[in-house]
Amino acid sequence: MSASTASRATACIVLALSAAPNRAPAQPVRTTAVEASGLSVERLARITATMNRYVEEGRIAGTVSFVARNGRVAYFETAGKRDLEKNLPMEKDTIFRIASMTKAVTSVAAMILVEEGRLLLSDPVSKFLPRFKKTVVLATPLAPVPAKREITIRDLLTHTSGLSYGTGPAEAEYRAAGAYLWYFADKAEPIGAVVDRMAGLPLDAQPGERWIYGFSTDVLGRVIEVVSGQDLDTFFRSRIFEPLMMDDTSFFLPAAKRARLATVYAAKSGGAVERAPEEGRGQGDYVDGPRKCFSGGAGLLSTAGDYARFLQMLLGGGALDGVRILSPKTVQLMTANQVGSLHDDGRAGFGLGFEVIEDVGRAGKMGSPGAYGWGSAYYSSYWVDPSEKLVAIFLSQLLPAGDLDLQAKFRNLVYQAVVGPPGLSGK
């Protein structure tokens, strides 16, 4: 069912989500007066004004914005349409393709297995996927050399495995192997088959020596399948989604939920948008595709409410509403910089699945030391700020996004509304 519409000026915002029969509706976080969370209602209204302005200017079709602080929903609003051609309004329970926001879920799944003693961060990937025993690196001048060491589970979590998305010097080989870029929903084969072919492709760098964004988390997802004896869809549902009551998060969409899936738009030159193509990464194969390839790197669909529960679990040290997914020490490890200055030229660190801010001046963006998050190819993003006890989510469906600056503005708009510590009021 759709979440109830809350007044932009009211002090209490309540989120109701669809729930399984005989279960109470899931609540992403407990709710209370906005002012009690140390956020200004007046200043939060600037988010609404900005989103509506971008929609009116035709620069984006629609958005969902969510902010919670200290376990209280402070802001949860929609703007624009989920489908311009059909004139369908954006709703709070609209379903989005979240692409690389999937990586956080896969990282949590891997750490569940670490906690159970079934996986070590230092384990070589070849222990579970033997084809990765001997890998090669495409070195200058485009001559493959043996990798100096094996890829480890930690390398996969930190994107230091040497695996790219196939856009490097060995692009032709990646394309020929059907392992190019992040989109897997159209593949009529399981992820294991694709990962097996990846093992024979050259790496872009020696394991552990560079931060390279690529297929690492997809390989990690396959490791999870082998270790657990379950496909990734089943493991996610049984160990994360069902315990957290994330009823609208899945790899592929049930037919009954088709109408809630947002349409993807593409930025045109000049800033306007147009409907993305039906094929490929445009609208995608999330409803009528083969439904066989579970991408741990970029395959999930979700809603703001569901993803908020996942993030609130992390902010809560691995637990939410009496359900524990991870221990606090595990979350602490995941959200600590693991790569030194390898990521983003040292402006930000990278943990086990998340970008991590260590110094706000060096990062050059609002936040706090220890804040962590990531984004999505479809122009969505999230972050968690433990110091401010804050969770923020911005969802849209725009690919490519061109030079749109709305994500960065959303972050600024959230932080400018922070006027006091959690639990105190202010203006």
Image (cartoon, rainbow, N blue to C red):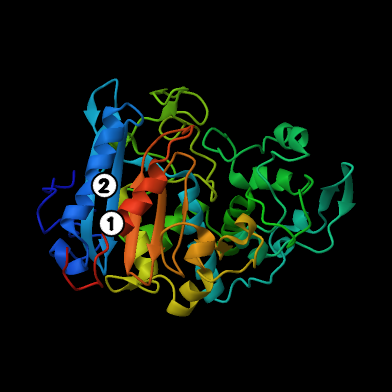
In the rendered image, residue 395, in percent from the top left (x then y), is placed at 35, 44
Label 1 residue SS = strand
In the rendered image, residue 107, in percent from the top left (x then y), is placed at 52, 61
State the quadrant of the N terminus.
top left
Judging by the rendered image, the residue that carries numbered circle 2 is 47
* Closer mark to the observer between disc 1 and disc 2: 2
Q: Is residue 369 rendered to the left or right of residue 348? A: left
Rounded to the nearest whole Å, what is the CA distance between mark 1 and mark 2? 11 Å
Q: Quadrant of residue 156?
A: bottom right
Q: Quadrant of residue 191?
A: top right
- Whether residue 80 is visible here, answered yes or no, is yes
Q: Is residue 406 rendered to the left or right of residue 88? A: right
Query: Where 189 falls versus 137 (above or below)?
Result: above
What residue is shown at x 26% (from left), y 28% (from top)? 56
Q: Are marks 1 and 2 in contact (CB under 8 Å)?
A: yes
Work out which residue is located at the far bottom of the displayed protein and give it. 329
- Whether residue 90 is visible here, answered yes or no, is no
In the rendered image, residue 376, in percent from the top left (x then y), is placed at 47, 45
Judging by the rendered image, the residue that carries numbered circle 1 is 67
What residue is shown at x 48% (from left), y 32% (from top)? 402
Q: What is the three-letter code of the residue carrying label 2?
A: Ile
Q: What is the three-letter code of the residue carrying label 1?
A: Val
